[in-house]
């Protein structure tokens, strides 16, 4: 297994927020682990010696001071009604209850996500094309 392949595995771990991953390929085995306080790579070599590489610590999640609007479904986040169209929201904009905030595509269905409450947009926490989970914060309103 090449170093580039190991790096791709480490990137996948970060993308899917995995704490450990083990891969066996022929007579080579790679175990990757990243404890929550720091991220480490453990590569057992064929000689049974361990090599540990320290990776940069993860950024702390942003402090959410306000009311969050969360995704009610799993899907792909879109900030506008069509590619190249104006986004539904911008930071500083005031929204009212029932206003369309974004679209989440799930199973080829475009689902408009509306505001359950009004307020000023403080943060937009997702980007176009992001896969969002049910309950994931999308917007922060004041």
Image: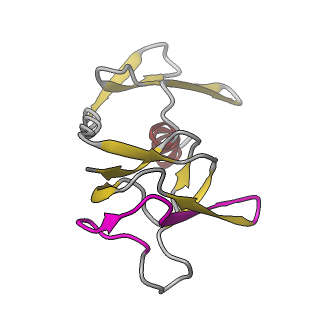
The answer to if 104 sits in the magenta stretch is yes
Up-down relation of residue 65 to residue 129 (above or below): above
Counting from the top left corner in percent of width and height, residue 11 is at 46, 44
User: Can residue 30 be seen here?
Assistant: no
The residue lying toward the viewer, choosing from 106 and 96, is: 96
Task: Decide if residue 67 is on the left or right side of residue 112.
Answer: left
The residue drawn where x is 43% and y is 73% is 88
Q: Residue shown at 56%/53% (left/top)? A: 131
Give the magenta-colored segment's residue range: 88-108
Say which of 101 and 132 sits in front. 101
| Closest to the observer, 74 or 51 | 74
Q: Position of residue 56 (x, y in %)?
A: 25, 36
Q: Residue 23 in magenta?
A: no
- Count up the numbered dots: 0
The residue drawn where x is 59% and y is 46% is 72
Q: Quadrant of residue 64?
A: top left
Q: Is residue 107 above or below residue 29?
A: below
Quadrant of the frame with the N terminus = top right
Q: Residue at x 27, y 42 (%)?
A: 66
Residue 132, image x, y percentages: 54, 50
């Amino acid at each position: 297994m090449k170093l580039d392949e190991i790096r791709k595995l480490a990137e996948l771990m970060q993308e899917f927020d995995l704490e450990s991953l083990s891969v066996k390929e022929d007579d080579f085995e790679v175990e990757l682990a990243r404890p929550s306080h720091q991220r480490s790579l453990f590569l057992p070599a064929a000689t049974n010696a361990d090599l540990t590489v320290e990776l940069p610590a993860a950024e702390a999640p942003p402090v959410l001071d306000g009311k969050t609007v969360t995704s009610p479904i799993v899907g792909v986040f879109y900030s506008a009604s069509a590619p190249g169209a104006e986004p539904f929201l911008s930071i500083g904009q005031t929204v009212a209850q029932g206003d369309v905030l974004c679209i989440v595509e799930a199973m080829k269905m475009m689902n408009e996500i509306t505001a359950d409450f009004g307020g000023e947009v403080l943060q937009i926490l997702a980007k176009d094309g992001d896969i969002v989970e049910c309950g994931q914060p999308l917007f922060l309103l004041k």
